[in-house]
Image: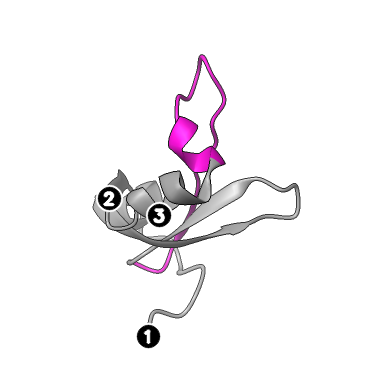
Amino acid sequence: MNRAIADYHKDDENHWVARLTCGHFQHVRHNPPWTNRPWVETLAGRNSMIGHELNCKKCDEGAPLDYQVL
């Protein structure tokens, strides 16, 4: 199910994590050649992707929320 990116934070291992509008978190790593997301490496790049939709597998699975949606 597609959900929009609302914000970002870093996890305990210093990897970027997107906070989705549905209440789930999703890692957004730039790890070529497997995952190509160069936009995640700069503030301007991350900001440009606010509102962009990612496939939220946690929604598809009915997983509990990672944070409270206001």
Front-lying residue, 34 or 49: 49
Q: Nearer the viewer, residue 61 or 21?
A: 21
| Residue most extreme to the bottom | 70
Which residue range is magenta in the image? 22-41
Cα–Cα span, label 1 and label 2: 19 Å
| Residue occupying the point 29% across, 57% down | 4
- Determine whether 67 is above or below 40 in the image: below
Residue carrying label 3: 47
Q: Are marks 1 and 3 in contact (CB under 8 Å)?
A: no
Q: Secondary structure at mark 2?
A: loop
- Per the model, the C-alpha gap separating discs 3 and 2 is 10 Å
Estimate the x, y position of residue 21 in percent, counting from the top left: 33, 66
Residue 7 part of the magenta-drawn span: no
Q: Earlier in the sequence, mark 1 or mark 3?
A: 3
Q: How many marks?
A: 3
Q: Residue 47 location, x and y as percent?
A: 40, 54
Q: Residue 9's spot in the image, x, y percent?
A: 58, 60
Query: Given the current orientation, which residue lies at the most extreme front position?
Result: 44
Q: Is residue 36 magenta?
A: yes
Q: Would residue 26 appear left or right of 70 to someone viewing this image?
A: right
Nearer-the-camera pick, 40 or 57: 40
The alpha-carbon separation of the residues under discs 1 and 3 comes to 20 Å
Front position in the image: 52 or 46: 46
Q: Amino acid at mark 2?
A: His
Residue drawn at point x = 37 percent, y = 85 percent: 70
Disc 3 marks which amino acid? Asn
Provide the major secondary structure of the magenta segment: loop
Which of the numbered marks, if any, corresponds to residue 70? 1
- SS assignment at label 3: helix
Name the residue tied to disc 2. 52
